Structure formats: C-alpha cells, structure tokens
Image (cartoon, coloured by chain):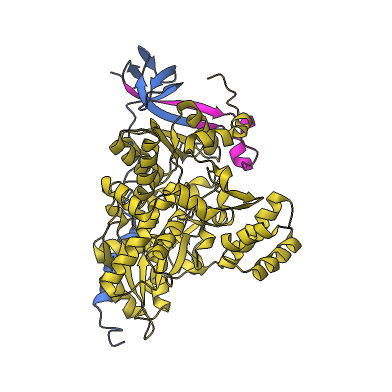
Chain colours: A blue, B yellow
Amino acid sequence: MLANLAKKGDWVQVQVTILHPYERAPQVPEDTKKVPLEMRVKGFLQDEVAEIGATVTIKTMTGRLVTGKLVAVNPKYEHDFGEPVPELITIGLELREILESSDGDDK
Amino acid sequence: MSQDRSYAAVMARRAEIMRKAVGIDYEKFIIEGIAFDYEKMMEEVGYSIEEVRKIQAETCVGNTPLVELKNINRLIKKIAPKGKGARIFLKDEATNPSGSFKDRRAAVSVYHAQKLGYKGVIAATSGNYGAAVASQAAKRGLKCIIVQECYDSQWRGQPEILEKGRACEAYGAEVIQLTVGPELFYYTLVLLEETGYFNASLYSPYAIAGIETLGYEIAEQMKELTGRFPDAVVVTHAGGGLLTGTARGLKKAGATQTKVIGASVDLRGLHMASDTDFNRKYFTTGHTGFGIPFAVFPDRSDVPKNAARPLRYMDRYVLVTQGEVFYVTEMLAQLEGLQRGPAGNTSLTAAIALALEMDEDQTIVVNETEYTGAGKLPSAQLTFAKKMGMIVKRADPIKEDVPGKVIAIPEHPSQIGVIEYPVEEMKKSYLKELIKRENRSEFTETEMKFLEEDLRATRAEIIKWIEEVKKSL
C-alpha cells in the first residue's frame, strides 16, 4: 500500500479549516489574524479509497464523523528525545564534584 | 446541526452551552454585581476531603510519596550562608496514574460527569490535564475528547504538547489539535454543543476540590516526617488551580501558618496568542503567560465563575527562568535519581533559591513533579529551541535570560535565583482590569466585601489601590 493512498478503515488524519483569517476572534494579535485557525484530528477512513489531499470523512475515537482534507495515512508520532545538548551534559558531573568537595562542610 | 457555528453566534450561546455542559447553575451564587459567594459554591458544588479521597482511591490517584531531597539539601548547605539552607521535601506527584497532579482534578470531574449521566467528557487543555482526563475517562468508561493548541501556522508542533497528545491517544481519547489562537475555547464550545458531553473544566469546583487532598496530604506527611507543618510550600503557578487547591487543603489540615509561594517561569513579553511567539517558549505551562492573567482575572476561564482564585491564598510570587529549570531538572535526575519534569520543576527551582535565604531549621515542600519523556525532556525542548533560533548558553540566568531569545543555563548552583513579582502588583492589576471591564470605579458595600476576600486585602488597601489605578487609566 502506498503511503499516500488509504482504504476504508485505515487510521488516518484529516485537516479542517475552522476559521478563515477574516473570521478570527477580535482579540487575536495581528500575526495570528493573518492565518486561519486549523484543526487536525485522526480517525478511521469511511471512504472506500482516497489519496492524500482528497476530501474524506473519518470516524473518530468517539464515533464522530468529521469531513476534511486527508493529510496523513497511519500518522507517525514525530516528537522525540532530542539531540544530546552540550550545555546540559556536564551539569551532573559539575554538581557531583561540588557535593563531594570538602568546601563549605564546616559551616 | 443547523445552528449557526460562526464565532460570534457560538460565543453568544456560551452561557447556555456551559450550563448544560457543567451542570452548575452559577447564577445562584451571585450576590450582587461582581460579588458572588465563593465558599458557598465550593461547599455546595464541591466534595468534602473525605469524599474526594474515596473517589480518588477508586482510581489509584493520590497518596503519593513525599521525599526529602537529601543530596540537593547537602548541596544547598554547601553554598548557603552560615545558618541558612532550609530543607526541601518533594511531593512526587508523577507517581499518579497518568503522571501528574492533574489526575486529582480529573478524578473528581470525571466521577461527577459519570454520576450525572454524561456519556463523555471534553477538556480544553494543552497540558498534562488532557492525559489525566483521558485516563480517568478510560477507567470509568466514558468517551473523551481533548482539545489542544498544538501547532503554529507552519505546522511546527510544540514537542511537549505533541507528547501530551500522544498520551491522550494512548488512553483512547480523541485528540483535536489546533493551530495557535484563543479560539480554542470557541471550538470547545462547538464540540460541547455537538456531543452533549460534560465540560471537564480545569476551573470547576470539582477540579479544585480534587487538589485539596494534595495540600492535606502534604500537611499530614510533613507532620509525620518532621513533627510539624512545613514553613513554606512552593507551587508551580499557571491557571491558579494548583495553588488554590493546595492552599485550601493545607488550611483544612490545620497548617494555617504555612506560607504558600507561587512560582512561574518568566516568559513576560511573549504574546500567548501570537503565531510567531508560540514556538519561542519551551515551557507550555507553569509560566507567566498563564500565571499573571489568570491571577488578575480568574473568570477569563471556560466557566462563568472560576473556582481557582490564587490571590486569595498566595503569600508571595517569584519567577524563575527556563534555563534554571532545565538545570534543576538535570540536578534532580543526577543527584536524586528522579527523572521528572521539566515544567513541574519550576517550583523546585524556586525552592532552591528560597532555601538559600531561609533558616536551616526551616522546611520547604515542593508540591509536585510530573512525568517526562519524549518531547518533554530538556534535551527535546532545547533541541527544538535551537532549531527555532534561540541562543542556548551557560551563563548567569537572572542577568542573561531573555524570553524568546536567550536561554541561559546556570554555570553554578549559586546562580539559581528568583525574580520577585510583588503580589500587590497583581492585586492592583486585578482592580485595573475590573474597572476597565465594569467601566466604573465605585463598588457597593457588598462588592467591596467580596473584593476584600478575593484579593485578601483590607478595605483601606483596596481604596488606596483603586485611587492609584484610576490615575493610570
């Protein structure tokens, strides 16, 4: 199965524009007002077959039907543990050294 | 659904939607004008400590360990002036089922939703509360929708919020991921109307009653461990619920002399609803973007009368920097063997600075920890920060931190400090916002009495502040 093609029952993600820029709340700052409020939600594809970008309907985990643009098939969790951060790596050693030094013990 | 779902139309139906979704008639607690009977609301709608303990025990929530941070306390003694260096104890709330104190809040909300016969619950939260509600809903067999503010307009997701979304899905919840904007509240109303589910608001009396057990347990456990109540409890402060609930629980246990100190990460200057500022912050909660606005106008929340009213209980408010909290998160992992946080370590960071100024025979309790992992770890957040163009360096955090530009990680534990934010300033801001909203600066006798309680201030102070505020308007 191609990653950009989904069939009925597949776990997919859709995107829906909730508010266009001109519909946004009055208190929204200027930069945010220039862009739409968009939403993504995952669920099971209801259409027989669909390609990325197509308008489809999904059934979400609570059983709601949501229609939107198909943006991912079997969407992956993309957050991770990050890279080793040089500014952090030595902190433990530095603290251990202070703890094990004899300075300040007589206080 | 044939109803008009435009922003203005839905917001106009707000009161009606909320009444159906929370099951509280807030009108009955209103005394006059701005005045309402807070204690009556908490009594009639909330649950007693005994009831809450029973409800929480059903889903393994609460009764978390309280531990002395002996290695960190030794480190503090080494760098503290003679006679200073209070002992720090940590309430390990990460041991709750979904990994944070938020389970206490969710336990009561979801119990109540089930009791009232709702088929599902909805919570608007980008924080640990989502996982807590999802976890409790799973246990009680209710459907669950969590609404998150998660991405900027380029679909760059805040790693911590993405992780919280994953956790919600792991408990079987439907997760709604939105781009930046305060209309998250609007869309939550749309979903409440569509589904008829219960609004598991963070700010209902149930949610706050759920946290009271945390303060109560701290008082009991400290009495048992040290023979007396703690001198101070430091609370990571965002929406105000943790501070309010903890303080109320401490008082109910008799710890009336314990100082309640709020601590937030300093993100002043970054606009919370700004698409560009959104990914310039590496803490998604526990920061000034929530801490100050929610203290000065609690009823900005998703319920008509917020049960979280921190100015009633806060004795002192201090700010710490992102870099300090990342440093202390490393400290907690490598000296105490506890991998937690980082946002939950905001209060621990402040506690270390406060311990250095407090006497060595005094005690401080840090009232929470939270689970950590992918997206949440300092390494995940700092990798993301660097990608967003932040400068990350080892330097004196109090002098060199610039929210949205520079993250300064201390070079030595003696650089851990706090920025004082006078509670009085927040009380004045509260009055300023109130005067602007109401478009009047005269208040009735009943309203003044309410303000004395809501601000924990004397009549003379309030009159003086109103005069000051009027001049600045």
Asked whether A49 or B93 is in front, the reply is B93
Q: Residue furthest top?
A: A48
Q: Position of residue B118 (x, y in %)?
A: 40, 32
Asked whether B434 or A26 is in front, the reply is B434
Residue located at (51% from left, 31% from top): A38
Query: Can residue B308 be seen?
Result: yes
From this view, report whether residue B168 is shown above or below residue B282. above
User: In this image, B247 relative to A105: left or right?
Assistant: right
User: In this image, B359 relative to A35: left or right?
Assistant: left
Residue located at (39% from left, 69% from top): B255
Q: Position of residue B161 (x, y in %)?
A: 40, 43
From this view, report whether residue A23 is shown above or below residue B336. above
Looking at the rendering, the stretch of residues picked out in magenta corresponds to A9-38
Q: How many marks?
A: 0
Residue located at (25% from left, 83% from top): A102
Query: Can residue B281 be seen?
Result: no
Q: Is residue B379 rendered magenta in the image?
A: no
Q: Is residue A14 rendered magenta in the image?
A: yes
Q: Position of residue B136 (x, y in %)?
A: 32, 41
Q: Position of residue B44 (x, y in %)?
A: 47, 49
- Looking at the rendering, in which quadrant would you find the C terminus of chain B? bottom right
